[in-house]
Each structure stands twice: as C-alpha cells, then as structure tokens.
Image (tube, grey):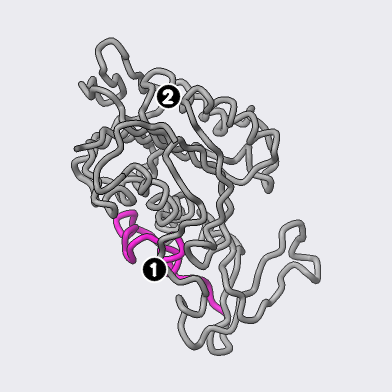
C-alpha cells in the first residue's frame, strides 16, 4: 500500500526521510516556501509534488483535489497529514508567547486543512511551550479522534537536549525507543572530547556567568537554526570549537551531508536547526505499521 501524505511546513522533508527509513511507500505532497529547504528536499526527493504557500493550499473534499499555487491535483484521500508549524510565538524563550504572533498563527492553517481533508493519521510538532498553549493546541487537534499529546526530548534518541511537543493519533509508545544513534557526545565527537561551553539563557555578554564550561556533558544544547548563535561550543583536546555542520546533522539524526544542496554553511545550519529529530519521527511513524502491513485505521 502507498500512503498519500500531505506535509505542511515541510522544511527539508524530515518526515519523508522517516517514512523512507521505515520502507513506507508514499505519494508525497509538500508545502514549503524557503528556497534553501526546497533545494534540499528536491535533491533527495525529486518526485515530491510541491504546493507552494500553505495559506493558498485547499483540499476540496467532494472532488478529492488539492488546489494550490502550483496547480490542481487529484489526490484522493489523505492518509497522513504532518507538519511542524513555525514556533516563534510559542517558545518560552521568545519575546511573545501567544497565538497572535504572525508566524505562529499559521497553526490555524494546519487546523483548517486538517478539517478539509480529514486525514486517517495526523502528526503535528511544535516547540516546548507553556501549559495553556499546549491545551489550546490540543483542543484544536481534538477534531481528529484519538489524538494524544507527547512531551518528548530528543536526548532519548540522540545526544541532544531538544524538548518538543507532538500531537498524533498514531499508536505510539514513547518508552519504546529504537535507536542506533550516539547518546553521549563522546561517542559523536571522539576521544578528544572534553566537554561543552554553554550559553546560559537570561544572561548577557556583560555578565560573568554568561557561559559555563561543563566537563564531559553527555548531550548538546538544542541545535538552533543559526550555527553562529552562541548556543554552545566544544572543547576538544584543549581547544574550543563550534559543532561542524556534519555533527549538527548527526544530532538531528540526519544522514551526514544531507543538507549539502542548501549551499553555504549558514544556510545548511538554518535547515538543520529548523528540522526534526528524524529518529523520533521514525519511531512515531512505526505505529502506522502492524505485522508488516499498513494499519487501516487511525484509532489508538
């Protein structure tokens, strides 16, 4: 069976990469407007059908068509709707923490399209946020039966501290982790690894405690979209250095070199930081498979 997938805010197609690793065949439709993310996605998955701006995507239920910037497509039923909507207004570290932020309001586009296509399965990802915001998003997602919210940290899958919220109706056991990725930075960096210098939130460069060295720290701080943001630095053989792009890719459980099509190191870092920890998505999507076959219902 081939799944018909609609991915909103597709980025570098981390969702498709997870499905690919599970051997799930797909017809994949994606909405994304960032030119560098599109370069990565188109390089790895040239058969993806790109739809353009999510605000212009419509699913016409009586004809089972997608109407969008790039045309009109006969898609049939949508088996899986996925997306990680922009999070700037939800982040606890952001200046705003509400649904009025221009980009965070795009979550309502996800809800609208969900209501239009009524997918069998749903996955929505967003940043760790205050309880009130989680409750509101849970209410929005309750239009799909059996949706549950999961508070997951990437450090169970790989050596990165990355706490994110996930809403899905796919059968999923968060305690059943299937991973072959390094769980300690020493495994990733090698024998010369000595520890990290962490930028402490809430302090400025003028404060004495702006940074703190932590010997033999097991996990990296959250990989952000900017490689040059003073997120953390490594000490290797007595020398301080930044993570390489290749290390950042591994911390997101991407294949090494996956973001090369984006071009510059800055754009590659942006793509990695905006992406998903693929191993988590892979474990969630594994619930679509039962006894080697695709489940025929989205109930849990």
Taking depth in this image into account, of 42 and 179 the one nearest to the observer is 179
Q: Is residue 257 left or right of residue 283?
A: left
Quadrant that contains the C terminus = top left
| Residue plotted at (23% across, 22% down) | 76
- Does residue 64 show up? yes
Q: Position of residue 207 (x, y in %)?
A: 80, 66
Task: Pick whichever of labels 2 and 1 is earlier in the sequence.
Answer: 2
| Label 2 Cα neighbours within 10 Å, binned few <14 / some 14-19 / many ≥20 | many
Q: Is residue 291 left or right of residue 171?
A: left
- Residue 190: give x, y in percent of width and height: 46, 83
The number of numbered badges drawn on the structure is 2
- Residue positioned most to the front: 291
Report the residue marked by disc 1. 180
Name the residue carrying label 2.
Answer: 114
Pick the front one: 6 or 295: 295
Q: Visible in this render: residue 36?
A: no
Q: Report the disc number at residue 59.
A: none
Question: Which of 78 and 260 lies nearest the eye of the viewer?
Answer: 78
Q: Residue at x 31, y 22 (%)?
A: 68
Relative image position of residue 167 (x, y in whole percent): 51, 38
Placement of the N terminus among the 4 image quadrants: top left
Q: Give, as a single range, the part of the protein colored magenta.
A: 240-264
Q: For this rendering, which residue is in front, 214 or 211?
A: 214
Callout 1 secondary element = loop
Is the Cβ of the residue at disc 2 closer than 8 Å to that at disc 1?
A: no
Give yes or no for residue 117 being in the magenta stretch. Answer: no
The Cα–Cα distance between marks 2 and 1, rounded to whole angstroms, is 34 Å
Name the residue rendered at 80%, 71% in the picture: 208
* Residue 250 falls inside the magenta stretch: yes
Q: Could you tell me which secondary element the residue under label 2 belongs to?
A: helix
Examine the rendered structure and indicate whether residue 189 appears above or below residue 86.
below
* Residue at the (29%, 32%) spot, across then down: 296
């Amino acid at each position: 069976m081939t799944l018909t997938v609609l991915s909103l805010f597709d980025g570098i197609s981390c969702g498709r990469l997870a499905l690919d690793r599970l051997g799930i065949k797909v017809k994949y439709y994606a909405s994304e407007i960032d030119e560098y993310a599109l370069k990565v996605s188109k390089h790895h998955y040239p058969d993806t059908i790109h739809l353009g701006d999510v605000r212009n995507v419509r699913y016409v239920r009586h004809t089972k068509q997608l109407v969008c910037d790039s045309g009109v497509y006969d898609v049939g039923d949508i088996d899986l709707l996925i997306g990680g909507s922009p999070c700037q207004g939800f982040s606890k570290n952001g200046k705003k923490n509400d649904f009025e932020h221009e980009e965070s309001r795009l979550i309502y586009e996800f809800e609208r399209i969900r209501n239009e296509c009524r997918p069998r399965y749903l996955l929505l990802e967003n940043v760790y946020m205050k309880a009130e915001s989680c409750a509101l998003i849970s209410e929005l997602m309750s239009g799909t039966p059996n949706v549950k919210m999961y508070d997951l940290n990437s450090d169970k899958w790989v050596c990165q501290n990355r706490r994110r919220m996930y809403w899905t109706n796919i059968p999923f056991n968060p305690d059943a982790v299937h991973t072959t990725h390094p769980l300690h930075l020493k495994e990733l960096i090698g024998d010369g690894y000595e520890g990290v210098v962490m930028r402490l939130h809430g302090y400025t460069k003028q404060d004495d405690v702006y940074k703190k060295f932590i010997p033999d720290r097991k996990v990296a701080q959250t990989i952000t979209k900017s490689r040059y943001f003073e997120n953390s630095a490594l000490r290797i053989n007595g020398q301080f250095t930044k993570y390489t792009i290749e290390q950042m890719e591994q911390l997101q459980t991407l294949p090494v070199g996956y973001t090369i099509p984006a071009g510059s190191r800055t754009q590659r870092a942006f793509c990695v930081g905006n992406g998903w920890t693929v191993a988590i998505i892979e474990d969630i999507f594994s619930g679509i498979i039962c006894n080697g076959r695709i489940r025929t219902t989205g109930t849990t």
